[in-house]
Image (cartoon, grey):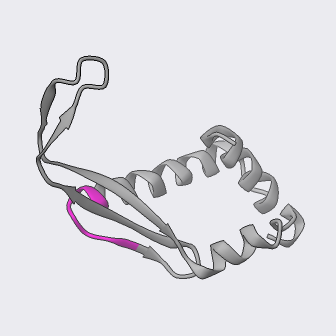
Amino acid sequence: MNKTELAAAVATTTGKTKADVAEIVNAVFNTIQDTVATGEDVVVIGFGKFERVHRPARTAKNPSTGEDVDVAESHAPKFRPGAGFKDVVNSGGRTLVNA
């Protein structure tokens, strides 16, 4: 499912227009990205936690040449699903009617 399909599914479930829901979905994703980019976690109880993790500088090997390559430090987003999310996945999901 892509973002457009997600917005369409939510629109069907809520009875709202696809355009309104797409605007809300974009706003939610942008807010999560902007918040995590600043180093603050976003926790949605029962769903999961979005966080920023630090990756220190390191030396890696180029697999084709075997040559050492310096990799600069960086930050990456990380998502850890919550218990409620795991329960839904392990039970095979729920129908859109019961969402």
Please check the rendered image and state whether residue 30 is part of the magenta-colored stretch, yes or no: no
* Residue at position x 55%, y 77% in the image: 82
Quadrant where the N terminus sits is: top right
Q: Position of residue 6 (x, y in %)?
A: 68, 48
52 relative position to 95: left or right:
left
- Quadrant in the rendering for residue 3: top right
28 relative position to 86: left or right:
left
**Looking at the image, which is closer to me, 6 or 53?**
53
**Looking at the image, which is closer to me, 71 or 23?**
71
* Residue at position x 63%, y 42% in the image: 19
Quadrant where the C terminus sits is: bottom right
- Quadrant in the rendering for residue 15: bottom right
38 relative position to 63: left or right:
left
Q: Position of residue 56 (x, y in %)?
A: 14, 53
- Quadrant in the rendering for residue 50: bottom left
Q: Which residues are magenta?
A: 35-42
Name the outermost residue toward the top. Answer: 65
Relative to 29, is 59 above or below?
above
84 relative position to 27: left or right:
right
Numbered label tally: 0
Name the outermost residue toward the front. Answer: 66
* Residue at position x 55%, y 52% in the image: 25
Q: Position of residue 35 (x, y in %)?
A: 29, 62
* Residue at position x 73%, y 45% in the image: 8
Q: Position of residue 92 (x, y in %)?
A: 83, 66
Relative to 73, is 94 above or below?
below
